C-alpha cells in the first residue's frame, strides 16, 4: 500500500478547530480588550503588587477617567498551576477601541509627572518592579460569545 498524501479542506474541519487562530478583529469604534500577565519568582509577589498598585495602577485609573480605557481589572489565581503555566497577576484592560490600545498616550508623560512629583523615586521603583519579573506577556482577546436570544 502506497502512502498517498491527504489534502484536507478547511471547510471540512469542525468549527472549534477553525476558531483556534487569531481572534477576529473588532470594529474601529468597538472596545478592545488586552490581558497583561505577570509571573514573579516565588516570594516576590507581594513586593511586585505593592509597586504596581503604587506606581502603575494610578496611571491606569487616569486612563479610565480620561475615557481612553473603559475598565481595568486586576486578578490573581485562587489555586496553583504547573510552573510552566503559572502566572501571578493578570491585568485586564478594556480600551475604548483598538487605536487607543495600540498607540502611545500623548498625555502619559504629563500624568506621570503630576502623579509622582518625586521622579527619581518613581523611576527607581518602576525599574525594581520590572527587575523582579520572571515573565510578562500581553494578550489581545476578543469576546466571541454568541448573543443571547430573547
Image (cartoon, rainbow, N blue to C red):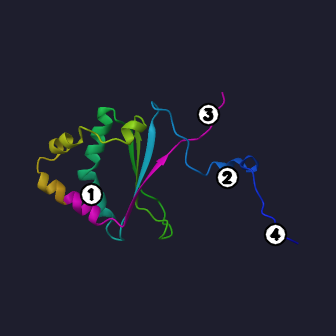
Q: Which mark is residue 143?
A: none
Badge 2 or badge 3: first in the primary sequence:
2
**Which residue, given by chain and number where applicable, does mark 2 sit on?**
17
Mark toward the viewer: 1 or 2: 2
Image position, residue 93 (x, y; %): 40, 44
Q: CA distance from mark 4 to mark 1?
A: 61 Å
Category of crowding for the residue at label 2, using alpha-carbon neighbours closer than 10 angstroms: few (below 14), some (14–19), many (at least 20): few
Q: Nearer the viewer, residue 107 or 87?
A: 107
* Local SS, label 1: helix
Image position, residue 12 (x, y; %): 76, 49
Are circles 2 and 4 on residues that touch, CB within 8 Å?
A: no
Badge 1 or badge 2: first in the primary sequence:
2
Q: CA distance from mark 2 to mark 4?
A: 25 Å
Q: CA distance from mark 3 to mark 4?
A: 45 Å
Q: Which residues are magenta?
A: 125-150
Position of the N terminus by quadrant: bottom right
Q: Which mark is residue 50?
A: 1
Are circles 4 and 1 on residues that touch, CB within 8 Å?
A: no
Amino acid at each position: 500500500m502506497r502512502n498517498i498524501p491527504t489534502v484536507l479542506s478547511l471547510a471540512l474541519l469542525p468549527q472549534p478547530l477553525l476558531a483556534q487562530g487569531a481572534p477576529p478583529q473588532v470594529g474601529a469604534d468597538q472596545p478592545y480588550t488586552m490581558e497583561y500577565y505577570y509571573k514573579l519568582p516565588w516570594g516576590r509577589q507581594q513586593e511586585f503588587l505593592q509597586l504596581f498598585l503604587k506606581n502603575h495602577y494610578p496611571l491606569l485609573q487616569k486612563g479610565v477617567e480620561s475615557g481612553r480605557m473603559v475598565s481595568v481589572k486586576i486578578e490573581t489565581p485562587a489555586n496553583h498551576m504547573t510552573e510552566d503555566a503559572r502566572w501571578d497577576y493578570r491585568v485586564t484592560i478594556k480600551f475604548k477601541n483598538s487605536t487607543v490600545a495600540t498607540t502611545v498616550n500623548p498625555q502619559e508623560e504629563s500624568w506621570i509627572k503630576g502623579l509622582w512629583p518625586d521622579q527619581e523615586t518613581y523611576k527607581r521603583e518602576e525599574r525594581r518592579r520590572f527587575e523582579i519579573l520572571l515573565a510578562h506577556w500581553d494578550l489581545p482577546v476578543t469576546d466571541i460569545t454568541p448573543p443571547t436570544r430573547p
